[in-house]
Image (cartoon, grey):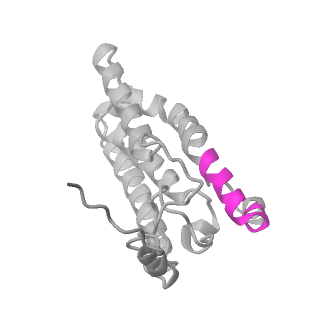
Amino acid sequence: MSRERPASPVSETAPRQASAQRGGTQHRTRHPSRRHPWWRTADVVFGCSLAIGLLLQWLWPLSLGALSSSPLRHLLALALLAAGGLLIVASKRALHLAGESSSPHVAPRRIVTAGPYRRSRNPLYAGLTLCYAGLGFGIDVPWLLLLVPPTMLATQWLLIRPEERELERHFGHEFQQYKTLVRRWF
């Protein structure tokens, strides 16, 4: 005999929504209109690009030429990795201070315009791109450097455009005004 649960007049997500309204960020719910495929994340886009770059390097090895054996290559890699890492940390900090999540699966409550978001609408993706290029120099895989522009295009088409459409739908004129004042990447 199965036992049916009595219908509750209060939704099971109500405590989480109430927590979100009180400023809690741990249990924020997904935006109702958001249907975000599992693969539409920076991890997947940059991970696939990294795998393709490594595969291409294995199949058709390229060299950075004289830069391959130069200490300048390591300095360039370190500078790009450091700049990208600092940009990511500063961006996450700005989001945290504003009470926002960096997850694209969580609905935003406000547009963050502090920290790196004053100069870039997508500083997390920009920082990740700098780190990706730094990795290419660091491990001496020119294919990764050649894949930076296509990876940026994939990021723009698969991640940024859908996110910005959602932000326009959610914030309307406020986000359109932010777009006119702040560049997408740098």
Looking at the image, which is closer to me, 22 or 129?
A: 22
In the displayed structure, 22 sits above or below 184; it is: below
In the picture, the quarter occupied by the C terminus is bottom right
Looking at the image, which is closer to me, 67 or 2?
A: 2
Residue farthest along the front direction in this orientation? 1
Picture residue at 32% right of the left edge, 65% below the top: 5
Residue 103 in the image, given as x and y percentages of width and height: 45, 59
Residue farthest along the top direction in this orientation? 59
Image position of 148 (left or right of 3): right
Looking at the image, which is closer to me, 7 or 126?
A: 7
Image position of 159 (left or right of 29): right
Residue 140: image quadrant is top left
Picture residue at 43% right of the left edge, 61% below the top: 88
> Is the stretch drawn in magenta largely helix, strand or loop?
helix
Q: How many marks?
A: 0
Picture residue at 49% right of the left edge, 60% below the top: 30
Residue 145 in the image, given as x and y percentages of width and height: 44, 33
Queried whether the magenta region covers residue 141, the answer comes back as no
In the displayed structure, 125 sits above or below 113; it is: above
Image position of 182 (left or right of 86): right
In the displayed structure, 2 sits above or below 38; it is: below
Picture residue at 34% right of the left edge, 42% below the top: 135
Q: Which residues are magenta?
A: 161-176
Residue 13: image quadrant is bottom left
Queried whether the magenta region covers residue 172, the answer comes back as yes
In the picture, the quarter occupied by the N terminus is bottom left
Residue farthest along the left direction in this orientation? 1
Looking at the image, which is closer to me, 117 or 23?
A: 23
